[in-house]
Image (tube, rainbow, N blue to C red):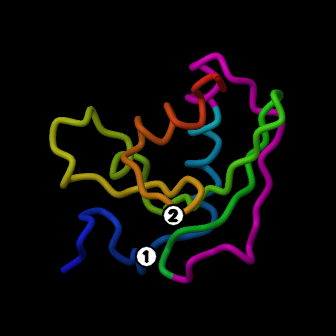
Amino acid sequence: MHMNPGAEPLPLGTKETAQANMAVFVEDVNAEASIVTSYEPAPSTDDGEGRFGFTLSLADGRVFDILMPGIPLERLRGDGTNAFAYHRVYVDGNSWLWGYAVAIVGEQPW
């Protein structure tokens, strides 16, 4: 059992699904008023457990390391009513539910 539910290994995760999820994540971040200028695969940061690394850059100069699960989007993107039902996205090494990950990347810097 994992200390952080939703952070367990995802043996069926694929790079292709992670890339598709990352495209939706970028759309959601852009909806928060941040402008994503690029996101690139960062294979050296893949966790080997079904999460795939990306480097995401914003127009304001901030850069984030993302570990995106390679599982179907509906297993990541929930309404937050049952946190135990959804897997986590990692942002700069910290695990978050989808909406929180979007908010952290999308928030405006101080």
Quadrant of res 12: bottom left
Decide if residue 104 is on the left or right side of residue 72: right
Instruction: Please state the extent of the stretch shown in magenta in the rendering.
Output: 27-48
Number of marks in the rendered image:
2
Q: Are marks 1 and 2 in contact (CB under 8 Å)?
A: yes
In this rendered view, identify the residue nearer to me: 47 or 11.
47
Residue 96 position within the rendered picture, expressed as x and y whole percent measured from the top left: 40, 50
| Tag shown at residue 12 | 1
Quadrant of res 88: bottom left
Marks 1 and 2 sit apart, C-alpha to C-alpha, by 8 Å
Q: Residue at x 76, y 61 (%)?
A: 41
Q: Secondary structure at mark 2?
A: loop
Instruction: Please state, as top left, top right, bottom left or bottom right, where the N terminus lies in the image.
Output: bottom left
| Tag shown at residue 69 | none
Q: Secondary structure at mark 1?
A: loop
Q: Residue at x 29, y 62 (%)?
A: 6
Instruction: Please state, as top left, top right, bottom left or bottom right, where the C terminus lies in the image.
Output: top right
Give the class, few, some or many, for how many residues have Cα within 10 Å of label 2's Cα (few <14, many ≥20).
many
The residue that label 2 is drawn on is 70
Tell me the amino acid under the disc marked 2. Gly
Q: Return the disc, 1 or 2, that comes first in the chain's sequence.
A: 1
In the rendered image, the residue lying farthest to the front is: 110
Residue 63 position within the rendered picture, expressed as x and y whole percent measured from the top left: 76, 46
Decide if residue 96 is on the left or right side of residue 83: right
Residue 44 belongs to the span the image colors magenta: yes
The relative height of residue 88 versus residue 107 in the rendered view (above or below) is below
Tell me the amino acid under the disc marked 1. Leu
Residue 41 belongs to the span the image colors magenta: yes
Residue 7 position within the rendered picture, expressed as x and y whole percent measured from the top left: 35, 67
Q: Residue at x 80, y 54 (%)?
A: 40
